[in-house]
Amino acid sequence: MKEDTMPGLGSIGMPELLIVLMIIIIIFGVGKLPEIGGALGKGIREFRVAQQGLDEDSKTAEDKQEKKEEVKES
């Protein structure tokens, strides 16, 4: 895989990303970009928090399963 491509996106490189950014600027205008960026950042943060919560829940479930197995062995 080339270094300038993102995993899972195929061959999207810097020129393609710049074209997409230009289209977004044309559609939404420069004034809306900070608002869109803030909303995107907030969404990413919420996703990460939810993902961490799921990771903690699965770890707790694994710990409970291990304790059950220890009790059965006793």
Image (cartoon, rainbow, N blue to C red):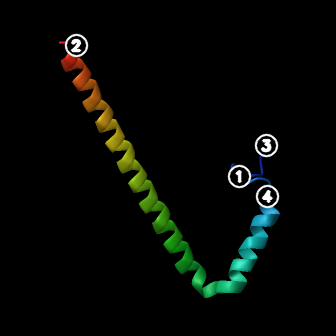
Distance from disc 2 to disc 3, alpha carbons, whole Å, reads 49 Å
Q: Residue at x 77, y 69 (%)?
A: 18
Distance from disc 4 to disc 2, alpha carbons, whole Å, reads 56 Å
Q: Report helix, strand or loop for mark 1.
A: loop
* Label 2 CA crowd tier, 10 Å (few <14, some 14–19, many 20+): few
Q: Which mark is residue 13?
A: 4
Q: Residue at x 72, y 55 (%)?
A: 9
Q: Is residue 47 above or below residue 41?
A: above
Q: Quadrant of residue 33?
A: bottom right
Pinpoint residue 73: horizontal percent, then vertical percent.
22, 13
Q: Report helix, strand or loop for mark 2.
A: helix
Amino acid type, callout 1: Met
Query: In the drawing, does residue 72 fall left or right of residue 36?
Result: left
Q: Which mark is residue 1?
A: 3
Amino acid type, callout 4: Gly
Q: Report helix, strand or loop for mark 4.
A: loop
Q: Residue at x 25, y 31 (%)?
A: 64
Residue placed under numbered mark 2 in the picture: 73
Amino acid type, callout 3: Met
